[in-house]
Amino acid sequence: MYPMDFEEFLMANGVQEATLSLLQNCYRTKQPVPEVIHDTINRLFYSYIIVGGMPNVVQTYVDTHDIGRVLAVQQELLDLYRQDISQYTAPKDRPKIRAIFDSIPAQLNDKNRRFLVNSLRQTARLERYADSFNWLVDAGVALPCYNVTEPKAPLKLNEKRNLFKLFAADTGLLCALSMDNIQFSILQGDMSVNMGSILENMMAQMFTANGFSLHYFDTHKYGELDFVLQNGTGVDLVEIKSGRDYKRHAALDKIRQVSEWNARKSLVFCKGNVQSEDGILYLPWYMAMFYAQTALPEGLIYQVDLSDLPN
């Protein structure tokens, strides 16, 4: 079962097609969203962060708007995940899978968000845990995001499989797994509580729902770029900003200056409204629902003439 995306969440909460069309038009034309609508959709986005997209959880929220009940349903789902680990995995793998699953919030809360296998156990090695990571990914519980040697297509050929972040497939469940009542802070618009990691997870969830494979770029020379996403035959550079200083992005600025990488787009998802400045498109977090793969051109027919070959 995959989470509902944000557009489906909005419709479940009574947002009408006219509003969605207005938002999509603002995205397409790069025009600011009217402030009243922008503020309302932002508040719904906060709700989406803590509720997530699991259908039973969303239905509970729509029916009751009781965050306590939402948390109870989320905890039931987390318990079911742990039961599945016990039921559908080999006994020798269960402790490893549980350890990975339970450590996702702490790993994301680390400064560089990179998953460190030796934090599970001092003697742990990645190759011994590979099957456990794959089980969580195949089960739709976790989303891997691999570092690349350079932000250049095709990204798959540039993957560094030993360096990765591991996101939760549903951000609402991540919040429930984190506990500490961060849900109530987020609902009040307090972005200071672990918001960087939670926002990054939310974006990973939304990008995955829109068909992207997740990659990031991090080197001592250029710094870290939150996401590098292959879009058609090109690459988009994407930053996620949780604070008000979202126009400060040193790594993005450095990477954009490398002409040989020739990025297709530079995007910053932030709390602000739609704005284009110096070749960078600033978008509200919620507009990630419209950011999708560019369709490949149709009619690229290639046929070799065989008439000169002997019969």
Image (cartoon, helix red, strand yellow):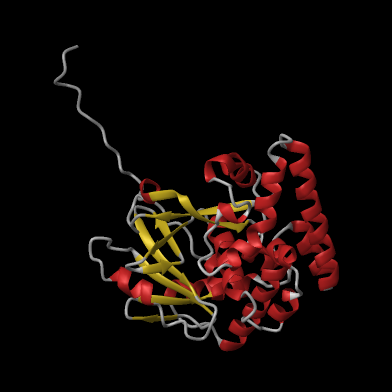
* Vertical position of residue 69 compared to residue 44: above or below: above
* Left or right placement of residue 300 versus residue 288 in this view: left
Rendered residue at 66%/63% (across/down): 171
Rendered residue at 48%/83% (across/down): 32
Rendered residue at 71%/45% (across/down): 95
Residue located farthest toward the top when viewing the structure as drawn:
311
Quadrant in which residue 30 is drawn: bottom left
Q: Nearer the viewer, residue 264 or 255?
A: 255
Residue located farthest toward the bottom when viewing the structure as drawn:
35
- What is the x, y in percent for residue 29? 43, 75
- What is the x, y in percent for residue 254? 31, 72
Q: Nearer the viewer, residue 104 or 285?
A: 104
Q: Nearer the viewer, residue 126 or 29?
A: 126
- What is the x, y in percent for residue 255? 32, 68
Residue located farthest toward the left when viewing the structure as drawn:
308
* Vertical position of residue 226 compared to residue 249: above or below: above
* Left or right placement of residue 102 versus residue 21 in this view: right
User: Can residue 21 be seen?
Assistant: no
* Vertical position of residue 249 compared to residue 80: above or below: below
- What is the x, y in percent for residue 290? 52, 66
Rendered residue at 73%/62% (across/down): 177
* Left or right placement of residue 311 versus residue 229 in this view: left
User: Can residue 122 be seen?
Assistant: yes
Residue located farthest toward the front when viewing the structure as drawn:
123
Q: Nearer the viewer, residue 292 or 116?
A: 116
